[in-house]
Amino acid sequence: MFEFFNQPEVIKVIVTFGSMLLFFVGLFGLLTRKHIIKIFISIAIMESAVFLIFIGLTFKLDFIAPILDSVNVEASTMNDPIPHAMILTAIVIGMAVLALGVSFAIEYFKLTGKTDIDEMNEMRH
Amino acid sequence: MSSILFVALPLLFGFATPILSKFGKNGVAYTSTLMQLFLLALAVSLLMTTSSYVEIISIAPPLGISFVLNSASLFFVLLFTLLMMLFSFYYLIHRKTDAYKDETKFFILLNMLLAAAIGLVLSSDIFNIYVFFEIAGISAYILSAYKKTPSALEAGLKYLLTGAVASVFLVFAIALIYINIGSLNLAIISQGFETLPYNVKVLISIFLLIGFGFKVEIFPLNFWVTDVYQGSSSLVNTLFSGIVVKAYLFVFFHILYLFLPSGEFSVFLIYLGAVSMLVAEIAGLRQTNLKRLFAYSSLGQVALIFTAFAMQNADAVQAALFIVLAHSVAKFIIFLAITSIYREHKSFDITTLKELNSPFLRAIMLIAMLSLLGIPLFAGFIGKFLVLKSLAVEGMFMVLAIIIIGSLIEAVYYFKLAGFMFEKGEKRELLKISLGEKTLFGLLALALIIIGIVPMTISGFLLDAGSVMLDAKSYVTMLVGG
């Protein structure tokens, strides 16, 4: 009964709609949440959605892992490795930025005790 | 090979700084400054040897990394190395009195920022552009929050939040480009972009506009800029307005010219730039904090540059490059002067200018402000005049009117500041300025005046740079062959 889901078109539709849904969940959180950590989580969700859609749409079901050895010499039946390499880099960069952001938030909380983005108005007085 | 040096040397120094600092506390600052001086000398020697310099470094064009150094990118490389070198020089002058707590970390960030800004300008691979986009971003966030006071941390947080959102949209755009075209090389994307379906084109353009829109400080995505400028130290603001935003502006329009050479979006972008300028200048009127006020002035100038770049013709791009140069130098003078004033007065309120007792600083700041305003005989005039001229040639009188109104509003607050500076009344005792600082400020102000009186000294180079930047066709043939 799950044969239906193995068709490439169905997978593409699921990936596209699923990750767009995830993207809008993140965007909604970004625009409505006020807690700084929740905003960071929303950004992480948006990032994951973009990574998913990119991998999902470039991944081909019947193709093998892109490793050249004595058995697999035919590059035409391999998945494209560039999106994977790119997304790995992007994940690392995204994590680094979020970690930096959380460390800023912690330092800020230690000094002022505030976590609400609306209360961050050191400059307004 | 020289174009790789511009990115590799600062990166190498950035990573080697912790080791260098083991050999002596003074080593880091001086060796970094020397390295920046070397890069500047290299850039100048490239400029001298050939009139139209082109160098491509690439590893198997369709896949690998490629850097393109032509006269457009050389202009920005020269500007960034010069400003960073002068910044380190200013830092060295005041190192004894107000050195940063952890100088090693500070210089790591400076060198990373320089490497990333130059990498953004040279790279011709969209994923490398993303990586440099993030490196420049991360160094800027940390520099912004460096002092770890509540307002500095708040500035850093706001900068980081907007930067993280911008990078999500940029990755989305890159993913869409790769899914539809199957390459990351700007030249190959440029060839394939025209044949894409219309809605995919629009989607990619919108995502790129949002991604870069945060970074090039364009209305309505620029709400964070003034808080970041006010929260960060005025020393670091010189880098934000002189280097960071200029690198992003170049990359954004470089990509735009390559992807949409026919200028489908240009009218929209011209109006966007003009409106941003007007909004920034109006909001700047009632500011009482020097850093915040000049942040609004930066927003206005950047929007003017944005408008000029968006016009997509050689004269307007030349004008944009003129304003880039004039604005970077003028803001460099102003923010460093504010730093010097703050060292004595311990306040950023605009009324401190009333008590300022330093004829030299007053004269220097006045020159910089007149240049920003676009008064004849100063460098800013040439750029603004050329922009208005090309707008008139194109027949866009509405935009022309908006820009003139914006400039008039800008004039109001500059003259208010000038009035404060030359007001008679109680003054503090004479502010001492060291010889090195005087030379630095004097040379920069002299540059503004010389460019203003004899623009022919650089206008040829800038026109060449502008037309090279606009010429998508030869860029593509250069990278992938006819």
Image (cartoon, coloured by chain):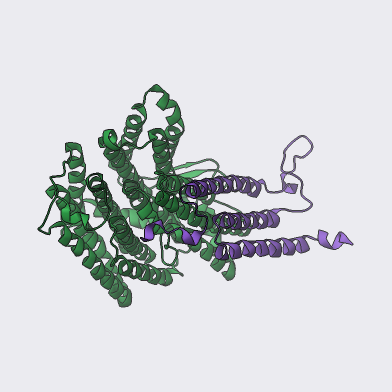
Chain colours: A purple, B green
Q: Can residue B7 be seen in this view?
A: yes
Please tell me which residue is depicted at 33% across the width and 42% down the height of the picture.
B84
**x and y percent of residue B472 in the render?**
44, 58
Is residue A44 or residue B40 the one in the foreground?
Answer: A44
Q: Is residue B1 above or below residue B304?
A: above
Q: Is residue B283 above or below residue B474?
A: below
**x and y percent of residue A119 in the render?**
47, 60
Residue that protrudes farthest toward the top in the picture: B23
Name the side, left or right, on which B182 lies relative to B73.
right
Name the side, left or right, on which A68 lies relative to A98.
right
**x and y percent of residue B130 in the render?**
51, 50
- Please count the marks in the image: 0
Please tell me which residue is depicted at 66% across the width and 58% down the height of the picture.
A53
Q: Is residue B392 above or below residue A69?
A: below
Name the side, left or right, on which A48 lies relative to B326.
right
Quadrant of res A22: bottom right
Which quarter of the image is occupied by the N terminus of chain B?
top left
